[in-house]
Amino acid sequence: MPRLGFFEWLAYGCFAVGAVVMAIDQAIKLSSLRELSWVETITENNIWALTPFVMLCISGSIILFRAISPSVTHPSISTSARLEVPKTLGTLTNHELRLTAYNIAAHVEAFSQNYIRQGMEIDHKNTSADEKASRRAMCDQTFNREFRTMYLDHLIAIQSEIMSRTRNHEEPLITFPNGLLGWREISQSGYQLVALSNHLQ
């Protein structure tokens, strides 16, 4: 499920309230409850009658504003499945370790594709060059931070385990310099890990 902010929840909440009021109103009209005096007092109130319309207007306005306003949109990162990496890599067989490498590489590739999509959305926004540059910088920082948090330690740990088993003493394939990485470097780290895992017998 995508990460929702306060205004997204407010929009969906208003939409739900409007829908519920309309459903209750229709149920009352089709049942014998409409004959009760207190029910009739509520349903004939102008506030009750206007609530669905007002809620839908608020919800629609929020969604529209969030869609067209670049200043309130932030990069969001999500994966279709949770990444599961065993804590004790040394207990895995070579086959299991290779599958683990393939699994994290698939997640990293999905992550880099999301990175690309976010960049394309920024480029296609009808905003000034300065605004695009600012949003692009924010996107790069966000994705690099998330890459460090979610994948980097796993990549390095799996790489070290594979290299120890294959007696490969070459320079590490996966590095993370101080500068920001682009989606190509992030994607390549996954492919490099898969290539290295293929040396396992």
Image: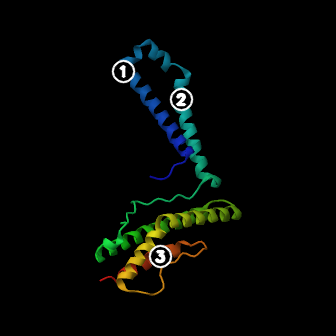
Q: Position of residue 110 (x, y in %)?
A: 44, 67
CB-based contact (under 8 Å), mark 1 and mark 3: no
Horizontal side of residue 37 vs 70, given as left or right: left
Read off the residue under disc 1: 31
Marks 1/2: CA–CA distance:
21 Å
At label 3, counting other C-alpha atoms closer than 10 Å, the crowd grade (few under 14, some 14-19, many 20 or more) is: many
Q: Earlier in the sequence, mark 1 or mark 2?
A: 1
Residue 4 in the image: state x and y as whole percent. 51, 49
Assess disc 1: are there few (<14), some (14-19) or many (≥20) residues with their C-alpha within 10 Å of its C-alpha: few
Q: Amino acid at mark 1?
A: Ser
Label pair 1/2, CB-CB below 8 angstroms: no
Query: Measuring 47% from the left and 53% from the top, which residue is drawn there?
Result: 2
Amino acid, disc 3: Ser
Residue picked out by circle 2: 51
Residue sitting at 41 percent across and 72 percent down?
105
Cα distance between the residues tagged 1 and 3: 64 Å
Asked whether 181 or 46 is in front, the reply is 181
Please give the label number shown on residue 189. 3
Q: In the displayed structure, does residue 36 sit left or right of residue 148?
A: left
194 vs 1, nearest the viewer: 194
Pointer 3 or 2: first along the chain: 2
Q: Quadrant of residue 155?
A: bottom left
Work out which quarter of the rendered image holds the C terminus and state it. Answer: bottom left
Note whether 190 is above or below 31 in the view shown.
below
